[in-house]
Amino acid sequence: MSVFKSCRAIRGSGLSLLLILSLVCIEDSWANAVSARSEVLAKSVVADNALIEAEAQKRYAQVKVERDLAAYKELAQVKLDALKDGVQKDIQTLTVRMDAQDKIIATQGNVVDKGLNILGISLSMLGLILTLAGVVGFLSVRRKAQNEARSAAAQWLDSNSDLQAEIKSIRERLQELESQARRNIDSLLKDADDAVKKMQRSFERVKEKKQGNPDTVPENEAQALARMAKAVTEKPESAYSYNDWNTRAFDAYLKGELTKAAQFWRAAADHEEATPLNIVTSLSNMASMFDALNHAREEIAVYDEIIERFGSDHNAEVRRHVAKALGDKGVAIVENKLGDPSESYSECIRRYDGTEESSLKLEALRARYNRGVWWGVSGKREDALADYDEVIRQCQLEHGKDFKVFLAKTLLNKGHELQDLDAERALAVWRDIVDRFADEEGGELKAQVAKALLNTGILSKKLGDARKCESLCGLIIERYFDEEYPDIKRQVAGALVVLSNIRGEAGRYDEADECMDQLIGLCGQDPSATLKEFVYKGKNGKAYIHLCRAKQDWLNTQTRTAELGMAELLITEAISLEPSYAILLGNQAYCGHLQGQPLEVTRQRLSRAIQLGGEALYQGTLSDLEVFPVGQCDDDFRTLLEEIWSVHAKSLI
């Protein structure tokens, strides 16, 4: 207030102007001094922020690589805390210095205020002198404050050079760990994605390959998928994406949790982010789970949903799923005896026959092929042959591998359909397969060639040419024994069974037994369920050979007892693999009867075998009783067989 009173006392305009200039300069002095203080404080804040940024980056790295940085975190934390305390103390020291600076500036203000009082009393010349003094004082204070701020900042940086180096080292380490974590994550994602693709390919072929050939998922890919699925479970299901549900579904499938897998694919299909292709893919996978679980009606309901929701979609891949759903629905109806599948097959043919899209054309051909199979089973042989001929005609116009495989399969089935009508035509059709594809590479085509050779051999034996059959079976074994493709192994196993039967019927039991040993060796170590049947069939074949040897040398008690004991052991081992195989149970009943087991035990076992095997087992057993008959023992068994069959036949009426 004293300043403004002095100003009012001054009347001259020149003096007033000088006074105002003095006030402005003094206020600038104050403002710049404050600015200098703020600059020092800002540098302190920057230093503090650097610490905070280092801490944040370190914590970020800890989340990604918890185990790798666990020990390092503790050491870095202790160092940083200690350094931070030191920095805080330095900041407090700077604050004290700035407070002292404030007091200096306040003192200068008081001096100026007194000068102004004198200025109110003195002449205008004296006011000019005071003004110049104020300017000089402002410049001096400003320079002093700036120098002190620079000095303090330089001292702080010098005293904390180790911290700066530590921060730089931490940043470099974090960058390195982040890069390594990114590489690990990329590798994990790739392995998981490869596992998903392999399983998806298996699902795509599930209906057309009931005998198996699934794509094996390597252990590293399975583990990667499991880790991805576990990571997904860390968040609530309400936050899941479509890919999260899909990942959990594939993981559940790989672990054999088929019901869970179906539920997860249902959730994936219902997700708001799912595209039409995502939805049909998830629904198709869910149908595959119901198929594996033997939930036929649920499976068919899913196919109906795909057809209804996406039947009018124009996307090529979505249309392929719709076509596949129509065909697979027909297969499910046949397999589960739920009615006539021809309507579903015909609808697929109507929609997609003649299309230019290769994948859709193949689905239409598959539907026509399956319809032909159905016509054949239903006794409509001419309709079946007509469908087969149309498939053959269309496949011959194409050049892709899938069409070649389908052509071979159709020719094979055409031969089956013809063998009772015209055996020579059937043999000619199968010979055509061998001529066309004998030199082709690839497991699927080789398997069709092996099937054609085996069918030719079996039909030749039926026509009375056992020698040709034996020769063809030997060719199959020689050419394909070392092949790993499961369907080829099945043909080799079948050839060994047929060859063993031929040699056994000729009394060449040692050679027949050798074939059975080869069969068990070929299939016994294979984990595929599709080859398991040949193991118990091989054991049953060996048991039958021992039964024949026992009957052939019946009067030799020692030989008979040993051979029957071996037969019993082999039959028991085979039944442990497949307790519902009718021929095994029939041989068990007969072997026990020859060993003198109680009649009621024989009756119980033979009744069970007849229930499972029906007339085929009855007729086969009668035929076997003609091999090395042993008088009253066989007569008693035949009487029991006729009695059991009579009761069973009446139950069927």
Image: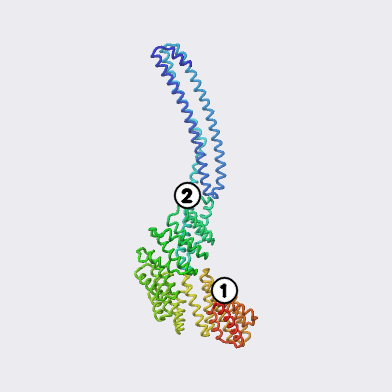
Residue 439 appears anywhere in the view: no
Q: Check disc 2 and report the residue beneath it.
A: 179
Q: Quadrant of the C terminus?
A: bottom right
Label 1: which secondary element: loop
- Left or right: 80 with respect to 426? right
Residue 152 against residue 62 in the figure, above or below = above
At 49% from the left and 18% from the top, the residue drawn is 111
Q: Position of residue 426 (x, y in %)?
A: 41, 79
Residue 508 against residue 391 in the figure, above or below = below
Residue 163 against residue 197 in the figure, above or below = above
Instruction: Estimate how packed mark 2 is, as few (under 14), some (14 to 19) or many (20 or more) residues with alpha carbons within 10 Å.
Output: few
Q: Position of residue 199 (x, y in %)?
A: 47, 62
Tell me the number on the disc at residue 580. Answer: 1
Instruction: Estimate how packed mark 1 is, as few (under 14), some (14 to 19) or many (20 or more) residues with alpha carbons within 10 Å.
Output: some
Which amino acid, mark 2?
Ser
Task: Give the number of the mark in front: 1 or 2.
Answer: 1
